[in-house]
Amino acid sequence: MAQRIVFTGGSGKAGRHVVPWLKARGYDILNLDLKPLDCEGVNTLITDVTDSGQVFNALTMHHGFDGYDRGRVPSPPDAVVHFAAIPRVLIQPDNTTFTVNTISTYNVIEAAMKLGVRKVIIASSETTYGVCFAEGDKDYHQFPLEEDYDVDPMDSYGLSKVVNEKTARAFAMRYGADIYALRIGNVIEPHEYPMFRGFLDNPMSRKRNAWSYIDARDLGQIVHLCIAKNGLGFQVFNAVNDTITTREPTAEFLKTHVPQIPLKRPMVGNEAPLSNRKIREVLGFREEHDWRKYV
């Protein structure tokens, strides 16, 4: 029987690629969002995830009309993937961004845990590293950016993601569950690769993203690997592709453009400054969409 997943925010920029990727690999998915998702075989339940009651209810509903044919009441899903959020600053006021993102994450994880779900994947962010939405030009403490970094955002969005990671850790410890937080890089959809020529011509414009990115389809693979990997408890994973988005190799580029930022280990070849070494070594991630294939 297909694994049953509740996916929040599947109608967003990342979700509208991740959900079809997972669906194509046999998952039974219910999308919780405020807008419908155009994906055959995936129902969207219009749900306000800041409302705890709606979340508890949504996690115990049939995924579609075919559920009624089975003759038994619906059970909680096998896993929950939580991507729903206000996706950046400057969409809503800062206090709303922080409130929506933290309360919704609390609601989703709490409902999953109390309903017996023991696998949750949440969307954290590259913004936790503190530079993406910083005031002015801020340097990273070091390169590469790895999961043990002292995250220090100063904006409402990045701060909400740090809080969400702490929320996830607390519930994982309390319930003995696997909750994995993905620090998702700059999401690139297939039609967006023409932008990379501008990135290459003006490389310092990419400092806020640490010259890194995640192809939305490769993000689908990462979510799949997280669902499949059990027994890790609370974990943080950088969710990015393998390589730097510059013409020069990584060490050469960093030495030329940001020589003041120290390296905590040698940077090899075209390794992305926002490192995905952990997902490659722990989860077995192998990227399929290197930007050089499209630019």
Image (cartoon, helix red, strand yellow):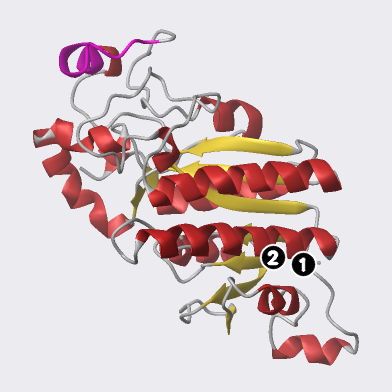
Query: Does the rendering let one see residue 27?
Result: no
Q: What's drawn in magenta, residue-wise? A: 252-263
Q: Quadrant of residue 176?
A: top right
**10 Å neighbourhood of mark 2: few (<14), some, or many (≥20)?**
many
- Residue type (three-letter) at the residue carrying disc 1: Pro
Q: Please provide percent x and percent y for residue 82.
A: 59, 59
Secondary structure found at label 2? strand
Q: Dot 1 corresponds to which residue?
A: 77
Tell me the residue at 39%/63% (across/down).
13
Q: Is residue 45 above or below residue 133?
A: below
Could you tell me which quadrant the C terminus lies in?
top left
In the rendered view, does 66 fall on the left or right side of 160? right
* Image quadrant assignment for residue 198: top left
Residue 251 within the magenta-colored segment of the rendering? no
Residue at mark 1 to residue at mark 2: CA–CA distance:
5 Å
Of mark 1 and mark 2, the one earlier in the sequence is: 2
Residue in the picture at 65% in, 29% down:
282
Front residue of 9 and 160: 160
**Residue drawn at point x = 90 percent, y = 90 percent:** 71
- Kindly identify which numbered label has been placed on residue 5: 2
The vertical placement of 12 against 54, above or below, is above
Q: Answer above or below: position of 287 versus 160.
A: above
Q: Residues within 10 Å of mark 1 (few under 14, many from 20)?
A: many
CB atoms at circles 1 and 2 under 8 Å apart? yes
